[in-house]
Image (cartoon, grey):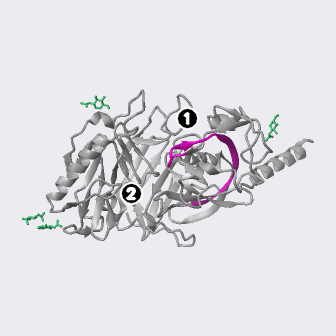
Amino acid sequence: MPSSPIIFSLLFLSIFSLSSAQPSFRPKALLLPVTKDKTTLQYTTVINQRTPLVAASVVFDLGGRNLWVDCDKDYVSTTYRSPRCNSAVCSRAESTGCGECYSPPRPGCSNNTCSSIPDNTVTGTATSGEFATDVVSIQSTDGVNPGRVVKIPNVIFGCGATFLLKGLATGTVGMAGMGRHNIGLPSQFAAAFSFKRKFAVCLTSGRGVAFFGDVPYIFLPGILIWRLKTTPLLINPVSTASAYSEGEKSTEYFIGVTDIKVLEKSVSFNKTLLKIDAITGYGGTKISTVDPYTVMETTIFNAVTSAFVKAAALRNITRVRSVKPFGACFSTENVSVTRVGYNVPDIQLVLQSNDVVWRILGANSMVSVSRDVICLGFVDGGVNARTSVVIGGLQLEDNLVEFDLASNRLGFSSSLLGLQTNCANFNFTPTASAARYVM
Ligand SMILES: *[C@@H]1O[C@H](CO)[C@@H](O)[C@H](O)[C@H]1NC(C)=O
Ligand SMILES: *[C@@H]1O[C@H](CO)[C@@H](O)[C@H](O)[C@H]1NC(C)=O
Ligand SMILES: *[C@@H]1O[C@H](CO)[C@@H](O)[C@H](O)[C@H]1NC(C)=O
Ligand SMILES: *[C@@H]1O[C@H](CO)[C@@H](O)[C@H](O)[C@H]1NC(C)=O
């Protein structure tokens, strides 16, 4: 067999090149810190991108289609690539345009590159830019601690412009879109390491965490978060982005709220508003990290607020002058404080059945606006709001929310404060010992 030495060396070569192109360590899950910005109430994360690496602070946008960053200012990278029109990257990104740029080539300005629509979902402003790829470095995790840093060579993102950053938290250079799309970060992370298309978000008023992949979620002092309640994730057939191409579905996460209760009693309003209209895409309930408070269509907002005011009055909690942007504020006199926040009437979002309920307790319903005034942390979304109920940041804090894109289900823990932990309690120290946890 005279040819065997050649075959051997070819094999050797291909194994060698494979192992240098792909890290031999394959993480089961990845991790991002998610920190609340005190001024804008936005949540931010850090994406380590480019060569040399830059820690790009970006707004965490749960429903955003993809990552976009400002490529006009200070984007320097030897690994920046612009995909050619009609390439595999462009079709994965579902780009509908092909762009030219009439100035000297630089990141964000290439010829024959497919176009993206970077969207500032905070201000509702979109522009056109190009798609690009670059390396991203990210920490792996076992669910207990951060683990080794891994590299993803070609993460697809959109190039935005400096003006598009207006309205975003100071120091941020774009938005990290976690929405349901091939090129949403959760799908790209899962594809890079062939792990489950699943991620979880645990927001808090300080530094919380997002997990990508399939790991047990363990928070100090060793609490395993499990037995999540689940509900189907719904698809809105009409995009809710600031700009989009005809026929595009929404990349935001919708769930099927069927009723809203205050103190176990159903609030009366037109329940048709809770359904997503299949033609217009209006109505329904979505989850958003760019809205600091839950937003409700006017008639729902008024009905829920007045039911809450009545229930509070039964507990001798007196309403005081409203403080913007809220509709109902109260004196803290006669309001006790518990582990799960102010002891006020609880609000329930009823899902597919009466025993699948997202319960909103004081820590997630009330905002302290001065020493002795608290307000119901819901805001009026106007009549004919695009989406009838938008579950916002305050209502998500210290709840672990899991998005399983493979099985189309949302899992939620309810307030972790009742379990004696919170979303700030993920152990970001990489050195701690092996998992010891209670269930
Ligand atoms: C793109 O092509 C046009 C016309 O062919 C040329 O004028 C322009 O400089 C090119 N731009 C870049 C960024 O290469
Ligand atoms: C309820 O809302 C739907 C959707 O906006 C509307 O078409 C319908 O007329 C409303 N029904 C009532 C009784 O107001
Ligand atoms: C509210 O105040 C009334 C009158 O002072 C009292 O009888 C009642 O017990 C109070 N209710 C609660 C829930 O504290
Ligand atoms: C607190 O409750 C008492 C009755 O228990 C009531 O008289 C009083 O007005 C309440 N104070 C406020 C500020 O609501």
Q: Which structural element holds mark 1?
A: loop
Near-viewer residue (187 or 303): 303
Name the residue: 39% across, 46% down. 390
Pick out the residue farthest to the right. 2
- Amino acid type at mark 2: Leu
Q: Is residue 347 left or right of residue 281?
A: left
Kindly identify which residue carries mark 2: 394
Quadrant position of residue 275: top left
Kindly identify which residue carries mark 1: 244
Q: Is residue 309 magenta?
A: no
Residue 436 % position (x, y) = 45, 69
* Above-or-below relation of 337 to 271: below
Residue 430 % position (x, y) = 57, 70
- Range of residues picked out in magenta: 120-140
Q: Is residue 227 visible?
A: no
Near-viewer residue (425 or 98): 98
> Which circle's residue, 1 or 2, is located before the other in the chain?
1
Near-viewer residue (316 or 221): 316
Q: Residues within 10 Å of mark 2 (few under 14, many from 20)?
A: many
Quadrant position of residue 32: bottom right
- Amino acid type at mark 1: Tyr
Q: Is residue 42 visible?
A: yes
Image mark for residue 84 = none
Q: Which structural element holds mark 2?
A: helix
Residue 431 % position (x, y) = 57, 72
Quarter of the picture containing the N terminus is top right
Pick out the residue farthest to the top. 279
Name the residue: 51% across, 46% down. 121
Ligand 4 visible in quadrant: bottom left
Name the main secondary structure of what is drawn in magenta. strand
Q: Residues within 10 Å of mark 1 (few under 14, many from 20)?
A: some
